[in-house]
Amino acid sequence: MKTVSKWANMAAVVALLASFIGLAPAHAASTAVVRWVPTESTGYAWWLDNKLANDPNNFNNFQVYYTPKVKLYDVIAANGATVNFKWLVTDISGSPLKNTPVTLVINPAYTYPTATQSSPLLNPRKNFPGDTDRDPAKADNANINLTTDANGYVTYSITNSTSDADSEPLMSDDGVTLPPAGSTTFTQLQLYVGTFTQGVAGYEARKPSQLTQDIDILEIHWQLGAVKGAKVAAATDTPPANVIRWNEKASTGVLWNTTNKAALQSILKGDYFTPKVNFFDLFAKFGTAVKLSWHVTDPKGKALANTPVTLILNPAYSGGTANVTDMNSKPVLLAYSGAQDGVNIPLTTDANGDVTYTLQNNDTAASAEAPPFDKSSPPTGSVYLQALLYTGTYANYAARTPSWSVQKIQDVDILEVHYVTGLPVATTGTTGGTTGGGGIQPTGGVAPTGPIDTSDKNDAPVVFGDNKAPKNVTAPSLSKTAKIGSEISVSLGKWSYSGNASATIAWYRCKSAGAAATKTPSGCVKLPVVSGSKISVVSVLKGYYLRASVTQKNPAGSTTVFTAASSQVK
């Protein structure tokens, strides 16, 4: 499976939290080696090494919760096909484990696939028996008990039953392109030495094997029309240096916008985009539709009529959490760690070189951001959607960053649409294209957010107002009930501040309940790595109370306020 799947994100959180509270998985010496044999497996179209998932420098990699020698392979097969898999099982010296009981795990706990099978009969979204909703945090989808042969090999066949309408679109076999970030029509396979029964007890008994057996994880993506054939050559020609600019006048639903300057220095220093990139914070009312429009030209300014373009919503490393649906009423996925975009949508410019797209926000007053102090101030939270538009057709992040990176070739406007509860507290200030500062700073990985104003490279963040540190008006809060398997989100509260303020959120586990506070409450310990406006409540938090802290910082200082505690996690 890919590092971008929900399973990977949740598993990473589980591993990190377990490590922090004394339940860290200890990687004992390997006891067995289980490797897929692709040359003796049949029925699939092609396969590729998922380099993103296997990269040990990726914080969300599999080595965190498997052995250091784990591998993930994406296997592409036609929907409705029968695929025959073969594995070789050995001890750590390479000697075959003959006539040895093994268990094939289909869709392990924490995977969220939708592909159905006719053999074995399987619907991963349902449990067994009773057709109750599956709880992937507690049990594998299926455990098949098998035995290796006299040479240490074991085989198994799977027949897919996914309809054409539900299959994944066929992607390019170029050795680079990975299945899109939002792909769910897959089946994941893991093979372990040992006999493990189906159900919660079997899953609990199997879990330690993840840390002691070197395995190959297979994720079979069932794609419409996938067949064996000649490979498509990977792209080598760099795309043209076209110019894509946001058309403010033709866009609707935007209440006001501001140019983000606070990350100017880091963007220029990091060389993440071209020197002529722009970054705009757009503000829209929660629950409304926003139509975004762009004008596309060649490097000399000639409009590019009827030209293929790709709209990237929540590009890799963006951190927005807004609840948005596209023009087909499908949810727009969030960005995933590991260099995966949320959604890539192919479009075409019109006869004038223009292209538009409408997005519907589904946030509520409770989940939307509080508005900033005025129309020159930066956003107060992360309830946003980020949008980029490039000429060319790109299925995913890897396709637009092979040996070259399109974002370093084409001049674009980065748009970050923040969904707010209303107009700013102060109504003074210009309505668009201001020299406002701020914005939440990019953290980690490639930093795709940031301001650019190339008229003056020495330009510095601009301070507005009375230059006082942020002041909390209404304490941040979170929902009182915290259940294992659910998500809990924080509301930033209300603040009064000036200058280039930015918000930072941290999460804590606490031994007891308590009211909102301005200092770290007694018995509270910060959770590692976990940040953002939402957190998954995992089993290692059972018995604790949760809190979040919100820190608003501007050039004059910073202020931190802790939420009241949630209910005890059960």
Image (cartoon, rainbow, N blue to C red):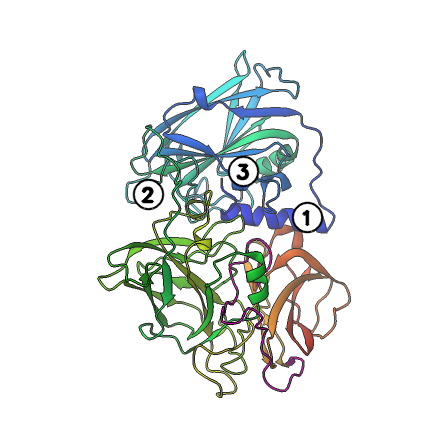
Q: Which residues are magenta?
A: 442-471
As shown in the figure, which amino acid type bears the numbered disc 1? Ala
Frontmost residue, 123 versus 436: 436
Disc ID at residue 18: 1
Q: Is residue 313 above or below residue 16?
A: below
- Neighbor class of circle 2 (other Cα within 10 Å; few <14, some 14-19, many 20+) is some
Q: CA distance from mark 2 to mark 1?
A: 37 Å
**Outermost residue, top direction?**
150
Ranked by sequence position, the earlier of labels 3 and 1 is: 1
The residue where tag 3 is placed is 199
Residue 458 belongs to magenta span: yes
Find numbered disc 3 in the image and state the secondary structure of the residue it sits on: loop
Residue 299 is situated, as x and y percent measured from the top left of the image, at 35, 59
Q: Residue at x 34, y 70 (%)?
A: 247
Residue 234 is situated, as x and y percent measured from the top left of the image, at 39, 37
Please say if the residues under marks 3 and 2 sit with CB atoms less than 8 Å apart: no
Q: Residue at x 49, y 70 (%)?
A: 453
- Neighbor class of circle 3 (other Cα within 10 Å; few <14, some 14-19, many 20+) is some
Q: Is residue 308 left or right of residue 537?
A: left
Disc ID at residue 169: 2
Please say if the residues under marks 3 and 1 sit with CB atoms less than 8 Å apart: no
**Outermost residue, right direction?**
522
Q: Nearer the viewer, mark 3 or mark 1?
A: 1
Q: Quadrant of residue 459?
A: bottom right
As shown in the figure, which amino acid type bears the numbered disc 2? Pro
**The C terminus: image quadrant:** bottom right
